[in-house]
Amino acid sequence: MKSLKELTRPNIWNLKPYSSARDEYKGITASVFLDANENPYNSPHNRYPDPLQTELKEELSKLKNIAPEKIFLGNGSDEAIDLLFRAFCEPAIDNAVAIEPTYGMYKVCADINDVEYRRVLLDESFQFSADKLIRSADEHTKLIFLCSPNNPTGNDLSRNEIEKLLTCFEGLVILDEAYNDFSNVSSFINRLYEFPNLVILQTFSKAWGSAAIRLGMAFASKEIVHILNKIKYPYNVNLLTQQRGIEALKHYEQIENWIKIIKAERDVIMDEFKTLSCVQQVFPSDANFFLARVTDATAIYNYLVHQGIIVRNRSKITLCGNCLRVTVGYPEENKKLMDALKQYK
Ligand SMILES: *Cc1c(COP(=O)(O)O)cnc(C)c1O
């Protein structure tokens, strides 16, 4: 890996971050806060929230078995994706490489930040080759994006190839594990210490059932986390979200239970899908959704919309011709979908 200084944009490396009123004092127990121009009324919502989400990170650190300094929290993982571009990619000079097809936000953030985005096609089984990614990289490639299980294909990426990429690539490897809770393979989080160039993204939006609170996690070396913390908005995670996050962590057995139910339901509807005459192929899934190749994706999509059932039409996406992406819902919802598709002619 190149040094973090070489990888970071010079203006960010040299940045002196905004120092909030609450940053200035530390360690002293105070009870009179006249430093931040807050209103004394309307407690607790009158106070600015903890900029570094200390309590939430402490709880998360126990669950994930990782030091709090290696955790970055943001307004969804989308914030972390954007900050990675802003911290490491010089607009119009640097570039990022990603597998294709994958999650659309990487390209959108690259475009917003005027960073060239290079796509490397997956193979027919939706796997990638580390060599191919590295071949499409050059000395200006700062980030390589992987997503496992991948969206929209649903499959886990090969661990051997991920390791190979982490070992051979000189820049940062962003491994988006938004759906790892639904997979049978373990997260790369317990291997962070082996790979200083690894950044893992996870989110409260999927398995945790908390998309509305906007809480995303990035796990990386404390040096990388420090850089992200320098450039984030000072109060990027609001108080209500921090509280809800802590609550969710206290009921982790609830989340494990949801995951179990969703995985079982996924396997059932995937099997049922295979029996439908309008379905040609159901791709393997390690996530809470699956991709299916159908006879006419757009016609079936429109037919379902008319029945009030919305799936994702992915037929315009590379390698996903005539494919629909189906999220696993409640059993009743899945049944409605099946019933509608059985009647489709
Ligand atoms: C849904 C999803 C996310 C989550 O984004 P949030 O901003 O945390 O809601 C991240 N990555 C992928 C691949 C996703 O599909």
Image (cartoon, grey):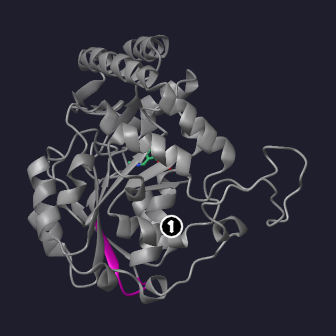
Residue 7 location, x and y as percent?
Answer: 32, 80
For the stretch drawn in magenta, the main secondary structure is loop
Chain part drawn in magenta: 90-97
Q: Nearer the viewer, residue 21 or 238?
A: 21
Q: Is mark 1 within 8 Å of ligand 1?
A: no
Q: Answer left or right for 157 relative to 19.
A: left
Can you see residue 295?
Answer: no
Q: Callout 1: helix, strand or loop? A: helix
In the image, residue 185 above or below residue 269: below
Residue type indicated by callout 1: Asn
Can you see residue 271?
Answer: yes
The quadrant of the rendering that contains the C terminus is top left
Q: Nearer the viewer, residue 185 or 298?
A: 185
Where is residue 100, by image quadrant? bottom left
Q: Please count the marks in the image.
A: 1
Where is residue 87, by image quadrant? bottom left
x 44%, y 26%: residue: 252
Residue 248 location, x and y as percent?
Answer: 52, 31
Residue 236 location, x and y as percent?
Answer: 61, 58
- Residue wearing tag 1: 229
x 30%, y 16%: residue: 264
